[in-house]
Amino acid sequence: MKLRVLMLLIVFSISTIVCSKIPRKNSSNKNEIKISYWGSFEEIQAMKKIVKKIEEKYPDIKIVLEHVSVGDDPSKYTQKILTEAAAGTAPDIAFSEVNLFVDFYTKGIFVDLTPYINNDSNFSLSDYFPSVLKRFTVDGKVYILPRDVAPFAVVYYNKSLFDKEGLKYPDDNWSVNDLLRIAKKLTKRNKNGIIKQYGFYTWAWFNFIYTFGGKVVDDVDHPKKCLLNSPASVKGLQFYVDLMYKYKVMPTPSALASGYQGLFKTGKLAMYCAGIWETPQLRKGLSFDWDIVMFPKGPTGKRGFSSGGSGYGILKWCKNKDAAWKVLKMLASKDAMKDLASIGLAQPASRSLAESEVWAKSPLKPLNKKMLNKAVDYIVFDPFTPKWSFIQKNIISIELDPVFTGKKPLKPALDKVTAEIDKLLK
């Protein structure tokens, strides 16, 4: 572990020095603005639409789009941007997810947008959801204009399976005890006792820690101590593990060969929790009716959800920051948010837009999208430290994967994880 920590610090230091000293190579067109981003096919199409609108409004500006394929590992995007920065080919504007922003901010690659905001009488921050704007603000300086917010609070459910069992659909006031009760009734076995239909699934296990009153660290913005082995955190995470191995209503990792989306689409999974970004795929030809409900409250009524979200910022190597500011405003505008909201891919970062017919009042599935506007009040972002991505990959995953596969007990693993994380946070 000490060697891994040392290597992390060396790589971090080198990349910071490289990124700070190598200038960006000049473009042949001073009004050319390169934008890097990552996302699904639907997002690519939406980006092309908004770029067309930008170029129509500003014909003297040429937009170059760079889509980065990340698969299931968003850290590849971070690596791509930092590599381009080191090579002097960094984009002018870069997309940033709320948790990846921590690494970007630490490297100092984004421009402070506050002077542009203060000097632009046609622009205001007042309509953004405060929580996502706060994530992109450090010491009073705004580095990213939010585009969307994405609480991991979305429980998709198959209405047909509920109807078949004569069960009432869940509402936003349900509890984890309700979840367990319903999941038990919706878990079915064949004549040989093998499960053929599961009641529930989620990968968002942090939610259970928060809803049971636990915490991951003492202070998300300035973490100094890990609290994963506190009584409330242990209780919440044990409930998650028990869904798989005690109550057997949730598929174990080995039972997810076809993926949870495949199980849900084929009627073999009644409920699952993820983010709203699953919507475009679910709108395509499902044979059953479905909707969403907010992730349940904890035993004492507490709520808490991990969250994604994203926005755009200007990189410090940009040669024409005034032109980039014009582009940036349109990328994070209501008009751009509408394109993503209309296909169900992203909850707008604009509160007024999220409460409008474009989102909350939209007749398109899921019908209960409005609940996400309330869920935003309970989101918890990852701890604000550049060490967190290393911690997740090299400490949390390594120690908890054997727990989630039923090979090791939870509490000793959490004690070990907490001790290792405390060392790094010091």
Image (cartoon, grey):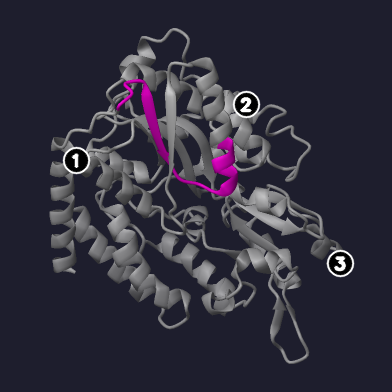
- CA gap, disc 2 and disc 3: 37 Å
Sequence order check: which comes first, mark 2 or mark 3?
A: 3
Q: Which residues are magenta?
A: 28-46
Q: Amino acid at mark 1?
A: Cys
Sequence order check: which comes first, mark 1 or mark 2?
A: 1
Q: Amino acid at mark 2?
A: Leu
Q: Which residue is mark 1?
A: 19
- Name the residue furthest top: 121
Q: Which mark is residue 84?
A: none
Q: Which residue is mark 3?
A: 164
Residue at 19 percent of width and 60 percent of height: 423
Judging depth in this view, the residue of 324 and 277 nearest the camera is 324
Answer with the quarter of the image where residue 233 lies: bottom left
User: Left or right of 156: which side holds 159?
Assistant: right
3 or 1: mark nearer the eye: 1
357 over 256 or under it: above or below: above
Query: Is the Cβ of the residue at disc 2 closer than 8 Å to that at disc 3?
Result: no
Q: Is residue 320 magenta?
A: no
- CA gap, disc 1 and disc 2: 37 Å
1 or 2: mark nearer the eye: 1
Answer with the quarter of the image where residue 201 lies: bottom right
Query: Is the Cβ of the residue at disc 3 closer than 8 Å to that at disc 1?
Result: no
Task: Give the SS element for disc 1.
Answer: helix
Residue at 72 percent of width and 79 percent of height: 196
Q: Which residue is mark 2?
A: 353
> Label 1 neighbourhood size at 10 Å, few (<14), some (14-19), many (20+)?
many
> Label 3 neighbourhood size at 10 Å, few (<14), some (14-19), many (20+)?
few
Task: Give the SS element for disc 3.
Answer: helix
